[in-house]
């Protein structure tokens, strides 16, 4: 071989003089044999490679081929239905077709959408929403362009589908809220799952169970009872092609529907209550005092939860989010307002309990209160004063001076301790997420509130003046409408506090079993029954002959109540008048329960910037009580349900 | 009746007179495997099958015709054929039809045609003719000239761009040089220069070619991009196992995971559905075909026929090896079809022309074996 090699090498460089055909032929054959040997070796190598792939690594590639082929497709469960206490449907799911685009598979989105618009209706609103969802979505997700396609649109698209790779029709479950704005803050809404929701789901260890779900509760009961409503996701094993399209089903585990919720809410009562507000802003919470069940839960203005379900379009969102009327604020749960005079009966009860006052003890009200050694006069609403005032009159006529004096004699921390029993300054523990505690001031609270480095010691110190303001429900006090309703319900329930709750019963959709949620007694007030009786009697006097008498003319039941007017802006001697900008007007409160002897309903009404509680809030309470106790609709009874606008007034007290 | 029988017998004799039965049997068996696999790969598309069957029929007729031409006559057309092929390649570069970003096709009336396929036959004919003429006085100069004759079409095809075919053409030309007796020193020298030049060539490769080579070196680099072909083909082959998933039952094939499955990657379809057994049978058929072609080459009587049939034999091998090595992940992805199996009329025709030349050589072999 070596010899041949060198020989041939020489030949190439120095041409031989004589050609020998035999040798030539021999060399050719040798070269051909070398090539043949190389070819056999190469094919042997290939066989080795095939053997490696198909025998040794067969298991590995088998697995890869299977995972290529088989996709686990989650099947979203039907979300539970939400009904009111009488079974009226408030939220339900239904299946509808959506037109969805897989952005990763479409090169020119704009052109594709333009083409699609020729086949199905695509509003500018749909485009805007699509853009927003596109920004939020992951690269491989399909994003809905149109929801709720009609059968005709589905058929039209199906015929043209071949022109639109990456565009598909999908059947998806939607949530619908038949009552729209009514009770929207209580019922809440579902919307597309975002990153924050994913974290929440991860915390529950439910990531797998949400694989097929597009929506999750965001607000209200939909949020708070998400895990009851959601249900269990089913699984389908399907064979898919390389584009992910399902070819056939291999196995299927059906999903388990979520549980149905029965709310304590009475939707008819709720409607009446919302209508009573008209165009005004505010809140109303009605509670069954014996059970803590929430009968009505108003936050005005409301919003249409249906807007959020498919992903809200940006202009509707801006409109809701930027509105000065704050429709997205869950007022009963998260709106904190100074309670004004509605705080008086509780402070009176505190005085009776501590012994600082007896029921019959009178004070003289000259129309103002002055701290010893100070020239500042805390003025009474009634110029010239109420004269001699006992405890009952202090509540019925809502005398400020009585409570200025009381506050002047009471340590704020003692007030704090007693008032805490009503749940002020803390969460009521209602079964809704997002509750705020409001403010019940104390020395500790003030010190913490002003602990920042931009405050000095004089800001953190508690002053007597703070106590006086707090004594008539102004100053630092800030209560939520829910807390107010709960406090009056505790009085109505003879001092026994029941935990407020929105949901009455949970129905298991598989077994049909209805599980009533038990009412929960949290605590009882540390008060004497005879002291409580004094307060209750005085509260009956308010609608009978006191500040809310005008609103309760001719009522066929005995109710108990207390008006309140919370200052937003200090008038500094100016007359209260319609000239004052509406957003600076006082908030109007009314807290009530009825029938007085055996209360079936307790409620708190707040009308933002409504002016006097007696004029703005009490008539709404009247409408709600009339309907709930008598079944009377507004306008049916003379004198009832007339809501007057705030008017100029100089002798009205609240 | 007997007369008719005798007549038919004579006609048959005339037809098969110059047909080499071994070569024919191996080629038809491979083409049969191709048709069966194509049924599966094309999801039983009648259009594709008909088109391939028509090409096969036409290719057989051409093969027969060329088998009936004496090698000396083939030698006479070598130079004009080469010049025409070069001219056509230039024409393609100027006015070819653009398909998938490459200019490879020339439209002639109803059919499209790839001049590069013609060159696969024309180049070995040309070189063999040239060496035959210089048989007794081959100088280093002759090899240099041959290199130019090879380089012209290689560069033209490479520019289309069609790296796979350019490599095949270059290899075929090199085979002629090798068989003509090019010194080992020069061969080793050329290989060494090639290796040294690789870093210089690298920047001149197209992005997708660089990508393919990088992906070949590390297939997991980009499993959804350039590595997709290679990894899906390996999955198809590997999951086929020993006996395969059965005809029409390949999941990689039928669920669309295999790209280019009726052309360059058809072997993955075959390997998935027929397993190691099928792959071995196909490998064996190629060995038989190439073995017979080698035998024909051994017995070739003139330098021209030896060089032409040797080059064609080695070209067949190169096709089969490069394709199967590429599909099984041993070589980077280059566009080389599996001979006689991949869908595609032009390649089929040029391969059968090659077989026709082999048969012509066989019919004019030396009568006494040396």
Image (cartoon, grey):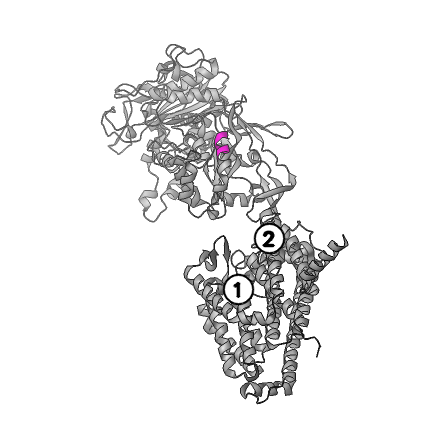
User: Mark 2 touching mark 1, by CB under 8 A?
Assistant: no
| Disc 2 with disc 1 on a shared chain | yes
> Magenta span: helix, strand or loop, mainly?
helix
Residue A530 visible: no
Inspect the magenta stretch and tell me whether residue A198 lies in it.
no
> Would residue A96 appear left or right of A332 to someone viewing this image?
right
Question: Residue A75: x, y in percent?
Answer: 58, 39
Inspect the magenta stretch and tell me whether residue A154 lies in it.
yes
Query: Is residue B46 or residue A311 the one in the foreground?
Result: B46
The picture quadrant where one finds residue A576 is top left
Chain holding disc 2 = B
Query: Is residue B314 or residue A243 the one in the foreground?
Result: B314
Number of marks: 2
Tell me the CA gap for discs 2 and 1: 19 Å
Q: Quadrant of the C terminus of chain B?
A: bottom right
Mark 2: give few (<14), some (14-19) or many (20+) Cα within 10 Å.
few
The picture quadrant where one finds residue A385 is top left
Question: Residue B201: x, y in percent?
Answer: 46, 71
Chain holding disc 1 = B
Reply above or below: A128 against A67: above
Question: Residue A228: x, y in percent?
Answer: 57, 34
Q: Mark on residue B54?
A: 2
Q: Which residue is mark 1?
A: B118
Q: Which residues are magenta?
A: A151-156
């Amino acid at each position: 071989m070596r010899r041949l090699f060198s020989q041939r090498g020489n030949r190439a460089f120095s041409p031989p003089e004589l050609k020998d055909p035999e040798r030539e032929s021999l060399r050719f054959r040798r070269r051909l044999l070398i090539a043949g040997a190389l070819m056999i070796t190469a094919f042997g190598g290939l066989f080795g490679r095939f053997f490696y792939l198909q025998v040794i690594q067969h298991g590995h590639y088998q697995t890869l081929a299977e995972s290529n082929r088989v996709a686990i497709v989650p099947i979203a469960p039907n979300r539970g239905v939400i009904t009111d206490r009488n079974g009226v449907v408030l939220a339900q799911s239904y299946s509808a077709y959506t037109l969805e685009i897989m952005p990763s598979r479409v090169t020119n989105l704009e052109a594709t959408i333009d083409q699609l618009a020729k086949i199905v209706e695509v509003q500018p609103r749909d485009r805007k929403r699509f853009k927003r969802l596109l920004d939020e979505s992951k690269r491989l997700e399909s994003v809905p362009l149109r929801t709720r396609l009609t059968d005709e649109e589905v058929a039209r698209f199906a015929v043209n589908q071949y022109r639109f790779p990456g565009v598909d029709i999908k059947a998806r479950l939607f949530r619908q809220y038949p009552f729209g704005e009514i009770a929207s803050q209580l019922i809440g809404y579902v919307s597309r799952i975002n990153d924050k929701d994913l974290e929440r789901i991860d915390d529950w260890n439910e990531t797998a169970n949400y694989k097929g779900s597009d929506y999750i509760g965001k607000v209200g009961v939909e949020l708070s009872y998400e895990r009851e409503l959601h249900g269990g996701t089913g699984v389908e094993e399907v064979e898919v092609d390389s584009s992910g399209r399902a070819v056939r089903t291999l196995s299927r585990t059906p999903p388990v529907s979520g549980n149905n919720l029965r709310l304590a809410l009475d939707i008819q009562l709720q409607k009446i209550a919302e209508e009573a507000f008209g165009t005004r802003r505010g809140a109303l919470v009605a509670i069954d005092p014996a059970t803590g069940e929430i009968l009505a839960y108003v936050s005005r203005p409301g919003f249409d939860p249906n807007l959020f379900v498919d992903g809200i379009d940006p202009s509707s969102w801006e409109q809701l989010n930027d509105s000065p009327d704050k429709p997205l604020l869950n007022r009963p749960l998260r709106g904190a307002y100074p309670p004004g005079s509605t705080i008086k009966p509780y402070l009176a009860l505190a005085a009776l309990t501590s012994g600082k006052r007896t029921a019959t003890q009178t004070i003289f009200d000259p129309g103002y209160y002055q701290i010893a050694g100070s020239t500042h006069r805390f003025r009474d609403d009634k110029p010239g004063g109420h004269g001699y005032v006992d405890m009952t009159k202090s509540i019925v006529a809502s005398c400020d001076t009585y409570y200025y004096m009381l506050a002047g004699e009471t340590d704020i921390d003692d007030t704090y301790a007693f008032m805490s029993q009503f749940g002020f300054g803390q969460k009521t523990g209602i079964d809704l997420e997002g509750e705020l505690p409001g403010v019940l001031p104390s020395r500790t609270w003030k010190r913490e509130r002003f602990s920042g480095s931009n405050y000095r010691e004089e800001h953190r110190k508690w002053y007597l003046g703070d106590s006086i303001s707090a004594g008539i429900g102004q100053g630092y006090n800030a209560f939520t409408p829910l807390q107010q309703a709960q406090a009056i319900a505790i009085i109505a329930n003879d001092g026994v506090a029941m935990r407020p709750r929105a949901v009455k019963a949970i129905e298991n959709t598989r077994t049909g079993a209805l599980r009533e949620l038990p009412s929960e007694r949290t605590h009882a007030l540390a008060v004497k029954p005879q002291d409580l009786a004094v307060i209750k009697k005085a509260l009956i006097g308010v609608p009978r002959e006191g500040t809310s008498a005008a609103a309760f003319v001719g009522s066929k039941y005995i109710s108990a109540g207390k008006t309140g007017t919370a200052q937003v802006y200090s008038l500094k001697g100016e007359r209260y008048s319609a000239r004052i900008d509406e957003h600076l007007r006082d908030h109007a409160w009314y807290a009530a329960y009825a029938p007085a002897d055996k209360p079936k309903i307790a409620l708190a009404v707040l009308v933002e910037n409504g002016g006097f509680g007696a004029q703005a809030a009490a008539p709404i309470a009247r409408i709600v009580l009339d309907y709930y106790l008598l079944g009377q609709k507004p306008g049916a009874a003379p004198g009832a349900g007339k809501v007057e606008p705030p008017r100029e007034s100089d002798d009205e007290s609240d | 009746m007997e007369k008719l029988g005798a007549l038919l017998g004579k006609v048959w004799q005339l037809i098969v007179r110059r047909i080499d039965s071994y070569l024919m049997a191996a080629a038809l068996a491979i083409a049969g495997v191709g048709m069966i696999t194509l049924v599966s790969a094309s999801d039983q598309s009648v259009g594709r099958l008909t088109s391939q069957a028509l090409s096969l029929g036409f290719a057989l007729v051409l093969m027969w015709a060329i088998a009936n031409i004496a090698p000396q006559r083939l030698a006479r057309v070598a130079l004009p054929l080469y010049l025409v092929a070069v001219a056509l390649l230039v024409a393609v570069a100027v006015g070819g039809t653009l398909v998938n970003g490459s200019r490879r096709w020339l439209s002639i009336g109803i059919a499209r045609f790839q001049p590069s396929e013609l060159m696969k036959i024309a180049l070995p004919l040309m070189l063999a003719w040239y060496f035959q003429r210089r048989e007794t006085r081959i100088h280093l100069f002759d090899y240099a000239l041959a290199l130019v004759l090879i380089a012209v079409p290689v560069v033209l095809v490479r520019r289309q761009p069609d790296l796979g075919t350019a490599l095949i053409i270059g290899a075929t030309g090199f085979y002629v040089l090798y068989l003509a007796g090019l010194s080992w020193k020069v061969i080793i020298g050329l290989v060494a220069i090639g290796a040294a030049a690789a870093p210089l060539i690298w920047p001149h490769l197209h992005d997708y070619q660089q990508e393919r080579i990088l992906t070949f070196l590390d297939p997991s680099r980009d499993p959804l991009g350039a590595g997709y072909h290679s990894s899906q083909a390996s999955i198809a082959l590997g999951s086929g196992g020993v006996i395969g998933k059965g005809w029409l039952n390949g999941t990689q094939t039928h669920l669309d995971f295999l790209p280019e499955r009726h052309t360059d990657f058809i072997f993955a379809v075959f390997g998935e559905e027929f397993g190691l057994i099928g792959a071995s049978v196909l490998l064996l058929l190629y060995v038989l075909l190439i073995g017979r072609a080698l035998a024909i080459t051994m017995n070739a009587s003139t330098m021209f026929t030896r060089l032409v049939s040797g080059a064609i034999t080695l070209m067949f091998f190169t096709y089969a090896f490069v394709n199967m090595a590429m599909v099984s992940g041993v070589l980077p992805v280059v566009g080389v079809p599996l001979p006689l199996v991949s869908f595609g009329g032009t390649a089929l025709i040029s391969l059968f022309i090659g077989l026709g030349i082999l048969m012509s050589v066989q019919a004019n072999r030396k009568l006494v074996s040396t």
